[in-house]
Amino acid sequence: MVGFRPADVPPTAAVKFVGAGTAACIADLFTFPLDTAKVRLQIQGEGKGAAASHGTAVRYRGVFGTITTMVRTEGARSLYSGLVAGLQRQMSFASIRIGLYDSVKSFYTKGSDHVGIGSRLLAGCTTGAMAVALAQPTDVVKVRFQAQASSSGPNRRYHGTMQAYKTIAKEEGMRGLWRGTGPNIARNAIVNCTELVTYDLIKDALLKNTSLTDDLPCHFTSAFGAGFCTTVIASPVDVVKTRYMNSALGQYSSALNCAHAMVTKEGPLAFYKG
């Protein structure tokens, strides 16, 4: 028969959306405890300043120390607190960010076969911003569940995912569900740009200065280096994003105010917690 072979048929937009979201959800099931530990470390010492370094204020030490402490004091289920909202976030965020990437890239290149790094960066930032704008409420709820210690009774902020959405909307208005959208979009742009640029730079340097060829070991090393550089550069924005999204109504007037409070009370190293 004349036509595409099954392997040559390009996936439809629906397949890209579902595939990207499903893959992201599966990955989240494995990495969620690490993300929860990161959130606990990022908010540790918030509003306490120097006092956080004395007594029982410093509760967590290191990622694996945090995980161990959480399992011992709250149970293993605490590592997956906020998982429902996390899966909702991945399904909506990844579906748009990855599912629309090729279409947006083609829009910027006007269908040209030549795709420069500028078009890739622009497409990544565009789809990332769109994904954040849609998925922000799920991210806010996820972070707040991860940040709260697993305990029963009136001290527990939220008891269920849907109840959390309703409570935030009732107490803080709809703007509360989109708290931290600005720093989240900024973080996404920084991650997109830094990962892509540093990956290419590291891979080119490896190919030019080592015996590695353009295959899996080179790609893995380049990706590892790009991930490290991206984390170092994006961490300050990520910490501010987490604290601002988790903050109570009126605690910070803006994301910049949150960053200023961190510097004055805890010092610049607070930007690298977690």
Image (cartoon, grey):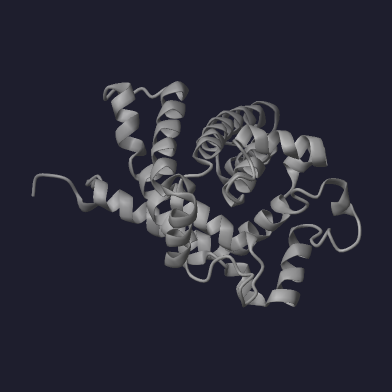
Q: Residue furthest right?
A: 54
Work out whether 184 lies above or below 51. above
Residue at horizontal 76%, vertical 48%?
47
Where does residue 129 sit, x and y in percent of width and height?
43, 36
Work out whether 107 lies above or below 27. above
Q: Residue furthest left?
A: 1
Q: Does residue 229 show up?
A: no
Where does residue 158 sit, x and y in percent of width and height?
54, 66
Residue at horizontal 39%, vertical 59%?
22
Please indicate whether residue 163 sits to the left or right of residue 109 in the image: right
- Which picture quadrant has residue 61? bottom right
Which of the two residues, 183 or 96, is positioned nearer the viewer here?
183
Which of the two residues, 126 or 216, is positioned nearer the viewer here?
126
Residue at horizontal 72%, vertical 66%?
67
Q: How many marks?
A: 0
Where does residue 108 sit, x and y in percent of width and height?
33, 24
Q: Does residue 55 show up?
A: yes
Where does residue 27 sit, x and y in percent of width and height?
50, 59
